[in-house]
Image (spheres, rainbow, N blue to C red):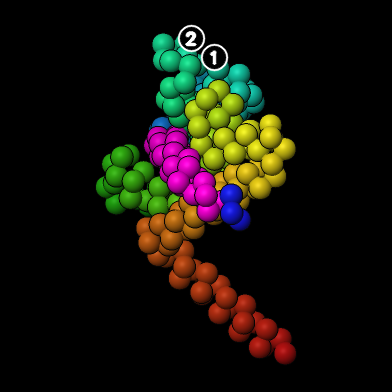
Amino acid sequence: MNWVVTNWSQISDYGLAHIWLSIPPIVVGFAISLPLGWVANRFAISNGALRLVRPVLLTVAGILYAIPSLPLFALLPSLIGTRILDPLNVEIALTLYAIALMVRTTADGLAAVSDDVKLSASAMGYSTARRFFGVELPLAGPVLLAGLRVVSVSTVSLVTIGSVIGVNSLGFFFIDGYQRAFLTEVWVGIIGTVVIALVFDLLLVLLGRWLMPWTRRQRVSRAARLAAAEVVGA
């Protein structure tokens, strides 16, 4: 505990760095995955070569996520011309991983929207863009939120690996503590990373409840029906 108090300034600095390295990949990855997921879903039932769009996109996404993070961090500077210690390398790599996870989730979420609902919206005069943002996206929202929560936890975890190439975050305490066989420092890194992941997850849940209040009403209504069914059964 004395070590934590003595080094609190460094812990807080690396904690803030960890947060700032995590946020851009989550936000940018989600923003890019939306149009890609829409394209994958839009051409899933097309004829001819367009039917290959969905499997190709999802396959590429799967391959991206299969690339080990550490080699990707080290390879990016030679591909995009950044310095080896530039935090941008970590953010770009984590954005690619976020896209790889969210593209399939977005495609599946949009595919779950009923065709009858989409046809009804079109019959009411909705344009393709208005139908997407006003009907399909809100209905797919719970699925997208679930996927985004996975991306958030994954990103916060992967940020720690950047410390291996000199982009410091809470992962620094893993490496330094391991090298010095000092478990307190390792636990500080672990607990700090878990706390950030939990806070991000809580914020996403609260954001989802604010943006999609109807999902909360649906849960309450479903619970009420179950309670009523138990009473009748008794």
Corner quadrant of residue 26: top left
In magenta segment, residue 178: no
Residue named by callout 1: 75
Residue 142 image offset from top left, x and y in percent: 49, 54
Query: Does the residue at mark 1 contact the one at mark 2 (Cβ under 8 Å)?
Result: yes
Q: Is residue 26 magenta?
A: yes
Q: Residues within 10 Å of mark 2 (few under 14, many from 20)?
A: few
Q: Which residue is at a point 62% across and 34% down the rendered structure image? A: 176
Spot occupied by residue 118 in the image (x, y as percentages of width and height): 41, 48
What's the residue at 59%, 54% (across, down)? 2
Tell which of 26 and 178 is nearer to you. 178
- Residue range corresponding to the magenta coloring: 4-31
- Which kind of residue does numbered mark 2 sit on? Ser
Residue 139 image point, x, y percent? 44, 53
Residue visible at 46% across and 54% down in the picture? 204
Q: Residue at x 64, y 24 (%)?
A: 68
Dot 2 corresponds to which residue?
Answer: 78
From where the camera sits, is residue 123 visible? no
Name the image quarter holding residue 80: top left
Residue 40 percent coordinates (x, y): 49, 31
* Residue 223 position by quadrant: bottom right
Position of 177 with respect to 108 (left or right) is right
